[in-house]
Image (cartoon, helix red, strand yellow):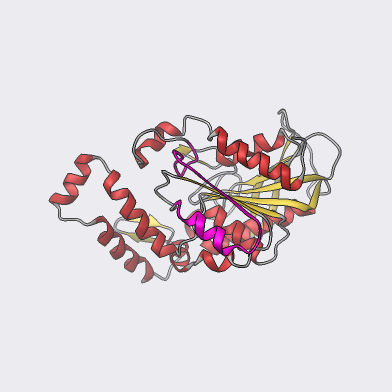
Amino acid sequence: MTTLDGAQEAPVPEYAVTFRSGVETLAGTLALPRGEGPLPGVLLVPGSGPLDRNSDHKRMPLGITGQLADALGTVGVATFRYDKRGVGGSTGSWHTAGFYDNRDDAAAALEFLAARPEVDPTRIVVLGHSEGGLHAAGLAAAGAPAAGLVLLSCSATPGEELLRWQSAQIAPTLPRAIRGLLRLLRTDLEARTAKTHTKIKATTTDAARIEGAKINARWHREFMVHDPRTDLARITVPVLAVTGGKDLQVPAADLATIRDLVPADVETHELADLSHILRPQPGPASLSGYKREMRQPVDPELVGLVVDWVSAHMGGTR
């Protein structure tokens, strides 16, 4: 058990901790609101890519898990968030970690949180964004100690099919000059994506160079064959699922699939103007808006939905 010391100055005391996942040592932040415990808790599982405990990438500081942790702390909910492999204070390599390695890390983080004496292990919610939502669903389906799930921008579509869908959505939103160049080169973005998938499937290494770029090949191979519907059908705890109407990376229509498959209480919300990074996006949906949007906080309506749902289901001071 990690001894807590050196709390950072914050409205909610935060402690830097480490935990083991297989051979790796991962670093995270445990936030413990003041007050009588044991407290309800939320494990925050980040999305895809080399993200730290706050969901920040070095070129894209999203702050999703960090901001949600702050909001949950104000209503007396303990939170735990962590750096992914090879990021921040965590050992390992992001480039060689597989999709299911990430799930193992989330399971180890949940075990760490449930073992804290300050936290009530019967009142823990697993909250995941994007890929993190898939792992939250997988943990619950496997019987992990989760009393509820919050799935933000979480897909219910098989991996390879989802990647093809993304290409189809993104192609029309590219800048006019790029679309013109693609036409000039007679390049079909969806067809090119399919060829890339074929090359990735032929790899056998954890990392590989595809079309000049180093990619996490094992993660892609595992993700492409993953079908989240299998996990969703085995969830027996309450679920809150929220996806944006302008999400180009996860179909908002998957909310209906989640609602239909999960044999438990499910609350779903499609927030019309929300993009995949959980901010409102004015105008037509486009990835180009991310750079501007991430300067704004996570959508207050979304934060309110999460805080209210967790408080209603697990308790809190709200």
Question: In the rendered structure, which segment of residues is drawn in magenta?
Answer: 252-279
| Residue 25 on the magenta segment | no
The residue at the far left in this view is 184
The residue drawn where x is 39% and y is 63% is: 161
Residue 276: in magenta span: yes
Residue at x 46%, y 35% (from the top left corner) = 280
Residue 79 visible in image? no
Asked whether, in this view, residue 252 is left or right of residue 147, the answer is left
The total of numbered circles placed on residues is: 0
Q: Is 221 above or below relative to 276?
A: below
The quarter in which the C terminus is drawn is top right
Q: Position of residue 15 (x, y in %)?
A: 73, 39
Residue 135, given in percent of the width and then of the height, sits at 58, 58
Name the residue rendered at 19%, 56% in the picture: 187
Within the image, what quadrant is residue 9 found in?
top right
Where does the image place residue 132, in percent across and percent down from the top left? 56, 53
Where residue 176 appears, as percent x and y from the top left, is 21, 40
The residue positioned farthest toward the right in the image shown:
36
Residue 40, compared with residue 234, is above or below; it is above
Toward the viewer: 257 or 140?
A: 257
User: Which residue is at 85% across, 42% downward?
Assistant: 37
Q: Quadrant of residue 75?
A: top right
Of residues 8 and 113, the one nearer the viewer is 113
Q: Is residue 172 above or below residue 291?
A: below
